[in-house]
Image (cartoon, helix red, strand yellow):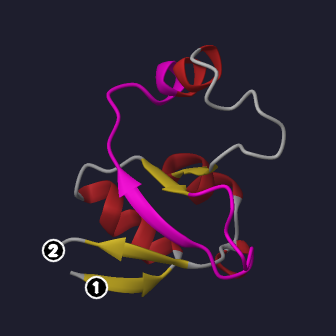
Amino acid sequence: MRFAKLTHSVLKELQSMGYNVLIAPYNCEDSENITWKAIAVPNVFDWLVALDCEGITTTPFQEPNILVIQDALLNMKDEDLQGSVFIED
């Protein structure tokens, strides 16, 4: 187990391990140093819809931080990625 700075290479490593989403609590004290946890969900879109439909994200300002790995790889530069991720080896 280790923490790694969030980069494209780390995201690709996580993706190769079967993970497709990073999550972090909504109440992170330092938004530039978020600690992410990688998870695997069967269908990212369905999972996001279920979060919204189950009322988890309907409370204002309490939405969890969510980063979809594939979207981040396609649309974000390394310098735009923030925080670190907990990786279970």
Q: At numbered mark 2, what does the secondary structure look like: helix, strand or loop?
A: loop
Which quadrant holds the N terminus?
bottom left
Snapshot quadrant of residue 17: bottom left
Which quadrant holds the C terminus?
bottom left
Verify CB contact (< 8 Å) between mark 1 and mark 2: yes
Q: Which residue is mark 2?
A: 89
Q: Position of residue 36 (x, y in %)?
A: 49, 67
Vertical comparison of 12 with 56: above or below: below
Disc number placed over residue 40 in the picture, else none: none
Q: Amino acid at mark 1?
A: Arg
Front position in the image: 57 or 4: 57
Q: Is residue 75 left or right of residue 88?
A: right
Q: Residue at x 84, y 38 (%)?
A: 60
Give the crowd class for mark 1: few <14, some 14-19, many >=20 residues within 10 Å: few
Q: Is residue 60 left or right of residue 38?
A: right
Q: Which residues are magenta?
A: 25-47
Lower position in the chain sequence, tag 1 or tag 2: 1
Front position in the image: 7 or 30: 30
Q: Which residue is mark 1?
A: 2
Q: Position of residue 50 (x, y in %)?
A: 53, 18
Q: Residue at x 62, y 14 (%)?
A: 53
Q: Position of residue 4 (x, y in %)?
A: 41, 85
Instruction: Find the distance from the CA under tag 1 to the CA under tag 2.
Output: 8 Å
Q: Residue at x 82, y 46 (%)?
A: 61
Q: At numbered mark 1, what does the secondary structure look like: helix, strand or loop?
A: strand
